[in-house]
Image: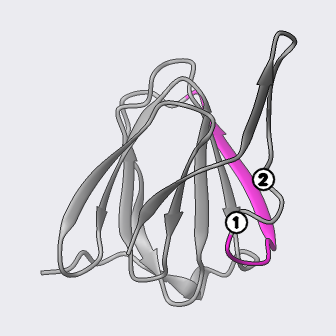
């Protein structure tokens, strides 16, 4: 089931430092980011084995998620919010602000056979 974790952030007069190590609940095998998105919807799939952790580092976006039992919409609007997506989480990212930078950590390297595009009924 998808859920938000708040990454540990250390703040003082100099600014903020957010820690990712030891907070992502899986070993990271791939890192990618999405930016410059128009009004398109990204994602639109789930996985057979891949777990993901998603952070909107700048700007904001929404992630609609369906785990086969319920549908939730998560708003990623702060760089310390991290959305954990399990393999069964069919997800689509949308409503990106023009300045959005969406970072994803994945538990596996890219494998096109790991993707399931059909939505739950």
Q: Quadrant of the N terminus?
A: bottom left
Residue 57 picture quarter: top right
Q: Quadrant of the C terminus?
A: bottom left
Pointer 1 local density, CA inside 10 Å: few below 14, some 14–19, many at least 20: some
Using residue 54 as the reference point, say whether residue 9 is left or right of it: right
How is the model colour-coded? one colour
Q: Which residue is found at the position 42% from the left and 75% from the top?
A: 46
Residue occupied by mark 1: 24
Pick whichever, 5 or 107, lies toward us: 5
Where's residue 102, x and y in %? 60, 40
* Residue that sits furthest to the front in the current view: 12
Where's residue 39, x and y in %? 36, 29
Which region of the structure is painted magenta?
Answer: 25-36
Looking at the image, residue 56 lies above or below residue 8: above
Where's residue 87, x and y in %? 48, 81
At numbered mark 2, what does the secondary structure look like: helix, strand or loop? Answer: loop
Residue 20 has which mark? Answer: 2
Using residue 84 as the reference point, say whether residue 104 is left or right of it: right
Pick whichever, 53 or 50, lies toward us: 53
Residue 65 picture quarter: bottom left
User: Disc 1 versus disc 2: distance between alpha carbons?
Assistant: 7 Å
Pick whichever, 70 or 41, lies toward us: 70
Q: Which residue is found at the position 81% from the left and 74% from the top?
A: 29
Q: Which residue is found at the position 49% from the left and 68% from the top?
A: 85
At numbered mark 1, what does the secondary structure look like: helix, strand or loop? Answer: loop
Q: Would residue 76 be counted in the magenta stretch?
A: no
Looking at the image, residue 81 lies above or below residue 104: above
Q: Would residue 28 be counted in the magenta stretch?
A: yes
Pointers 1 and 2 in contact (C-beta within 8 Å):
yes
Looking at the image, residue 33 lies above or below residue 43: above
Pointer 2 local density, CA inside 10 Å: few below 14, some 14–19, many at least 20: few
Using residue 109 as the reference point, say whether residue 6 is left or right of it: left
């Amino acid at each position: 089931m998808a859920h938000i974790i708040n990454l540990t952030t250390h703040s003082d007069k100099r600014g903020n430092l957010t820690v990712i190590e030891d907070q992502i609940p899986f070993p990271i095998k791939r890192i990618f980011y999405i930016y410059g998105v128009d009004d398109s919807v990204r994602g639109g799939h789930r996985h057979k084995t891949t777990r993901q952790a998603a952070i909107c580092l700048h700007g904001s976006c929404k992630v609609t998620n369906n785990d086969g039992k319920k549908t939730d919409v998560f708003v990623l609007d702060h760089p310390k919010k991290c959305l954990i997506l399990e393999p069964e989480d069919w997800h689509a990212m949308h409503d990106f602000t023009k300045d959005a930078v969406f970072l994803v950590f994945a538990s596996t390297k890219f494998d096109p056979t790991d993707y399931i595009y059909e939505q739950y009924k």
